[in-house]
Image (cartoon, helix red, strand yellow):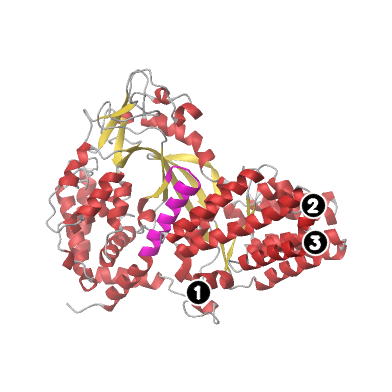
Amino acid sequence: MDIVPECMEYVKHTAEYFPKRVMRTKLLNFVLEKITKVPVFYSGSRAEGIPCVSSDTDFMYEVKAVSPGSHEGENRFGDEEENVSVVLDLTDVHPGYTKVRILNGSWQDSSEFALYGNGLRSLCKLGTSYLSNMLVSEYWSTRLPNIFPNHGMRQETFLHGPCISTKYDSKSKVAEIDTMLCWKCEWPEVANEWVERDRKFNWPTQEIVNEIKKTGCNLVPVGYANSGTKELEWRFSFSKAEWVIIWSFNATQIACIDIMKLLFDNCISPKFPDLFPSYFIKTTMFWLIEETDCNFWKPQNLFVCLDKLLLNIISCLDQKRIRNYFIPENNMMDAKSPEELAKLHEELKICWDNGEEKWLRLIKENLSTIDKNEIYFHHILINGLTISRHLIYTTMQSLNLTDWKEKTKQTIRDLKRCGENGTLPDACNILSQEFEALLTIYSFYSSRFDGNMEFILSTENIKHVEETLRNCAKLSHSTGILQLAIFYFCLERYPDALQVVQQVQKKYTSQVVHYQFWERHKTPRDHDYPQAMQRPSLEQTMQNYISLDFVLLPCLSRLYPDMIQEKLRDGRILFIHPLFFAIHLQFCCFCMMGDVEKCEETVQKMQIFVKQNIDLLRKTRDFTIVDLTTSCLRIVRTDKHSEDYFNETMKSLI
């Protein structure tokens, strides 16, 4: 067969973007575990780096202080001198599931269930010693708002299988965020066959097998669909193991599973929703790679690889059996409708008869939608940076100045260590520089708060802060440069502050891509950037084309104008559009200088900004800039005028 250029291009593109997605997942998990200190990890197909079109964003929260053991008397709960509290019970359950039983004894409940609820025993089904997955999920729904940041999130939650879900209003669609409470568990005996299995082609390698066994697994709160004791059952989840396995794929294997997911997304799943989830495709792929020589998986063989994977899926449907990769006794298909499986089998046979053309069409279509321009080249890195930045800042929102200072110092050390380990070093460097600039501001203003005027008035110290903030300004439009404007504002150097904010407004051209939490406001295209360098570095891209939300920290509220301080009194961190903040700070400068005419002109700019972004504000439910515009209007107009503006604007938003 002749080598198809599109196949080679697709695999080449896969080899470029996939490692970046892996690095993003590692960065987010590092931030969650080491910096925010929340026992949550990013999971699902997005974390693995091969998402479907309809993939949700998944997070799994590992319960603290409780780790079920396979045998009674093995695991400790809390203090090492105490008796074990919970164990697995695999009697009368479907393969791949277990019950979790609380042991009798005088042990003290030191779990988070005792800290935030009524204790672990209260989560058992009435009259039993077995933990109820339903009661645990209900408990989790009450804890969720206290653990995850709510900026950009809708307040309501709903049950989605074993997950508690919420919605995030992004630029292009309403995204779903799934969070799940789970138990961290040692490697279960029921999965020992996977560890000891003979592998003809040495995949996965013994090194990978040993790493996975050491990591263990999780138990998630969902029972077997056809079980009479479904509420008491928990499913073994091997999410972490699946990362390690998928991250060992070569580019052809990644491209193969990616294209198969595209086929199902475009042609199969709309007709058969939830019948053959992407997890089944992944599992079939695992078995296929294990049973195939590694020389089979080459770019020039992509069509052959896809045909082989599709044939294996058709064979699974023919047998109405798909073996769990880690616990083969678990037929994950046996709770599905046999009639529907038969219809899907016929549909895939028809698809098979379309030959290589079906693959070529999908590859061409997907290649045409891949944004290969130079700005997008860094998108995955910037996305990982913005999410990490958001998570870190949100965990710091309730800290006082002293605690915030210590937390910031530790965060800088952690980020530098993460970068040195090779996990998105550019993103870690940008974050650490941003926090170092904030520390510089803190050190300067803590002297001001302490009345150390000699330090404050020192020309040398002022120049040091200015230099630090100007260097930080190179990171993006919204980091150091606006902090520099605040610095001047607090020193009552209003003309200098105005000069900075005017520079921001002038630089904020149509070529700038504004990143909010998890989302950018537009898709950049090459023809929008005629002066762009070929493959600019991340630092060059950030400095010239990327703007991040400007962060207002409650612990530093005394640095901000009075109207901003009003918004920070409830302890929130405000993630605000940098261009709007520049205009708002401009208004505050003119107000302090007593220039009424300029105040009038500037508040009109704020109103225009709100009007131009009304659709985005409606989607993200971000009403802060409406509040601030109203406050400014109240200064230059009547209370009646500002109240009418607020009511009319909010009416168009809600």
Task: Mark yes or no: residue 360 visible.
Answer: yes
What number is the disc on residue 642? 2
Circle 1 SS class = loop
Quadrant including the N terminus: bottom left
User: Residue placed at 28% from the left, 75% from the top?
Assistant: 8
Magenta stretch contains residue 535: no
Measuring 36% from the left and 72% from the top, which residue is drawn there?
Answer: 367
Q: Residues within 10 Å of mark 3 (few under 14, many from 20)?
A: many
Please rate how many residues cluster around mark 1, counting C-alpha atoms within 10 Å: few if below 14, some from 14 to 19, many from 20: some
Q: Amino acid at mark 3?
A: Cys
Residue 542's image quarter?
bottom right
Query: CA separation, marks 2 and 3?
Result: 20 Å
Q: Amino acid at mark 2?
A: Ser
As drawn, is 98 to the left or to the right of 383?
A: left
Residue 110 drawn at (x, y percent): 44, 27
The residue indicated by pointer 3 is 589
Residue numbers of the magenta segment? 19-40
Relative to 163, say whether 582 is above or below: below
Image vertical order of residue 141 relative to residue 449, above or below: above
Q: Main secondary structure of the magenta part?
A: helix
Q: Judge by depth and name the residue closer to the eye, 436 or 140.
A: 436
Residue receiving disc 1: 525
Count of numbered badges drawn on the protein: 3
Q: CA distance from mark 3 to mark 1?
A: 36 Å
Tell me whether the residue at label 2 lies in contact with that at label 3, contact meaning CB atoms closer than 8 angstroms: no
Tag 1: amino acid? Arg
Q: Is residue 421 left or right of residue 532?
A: left
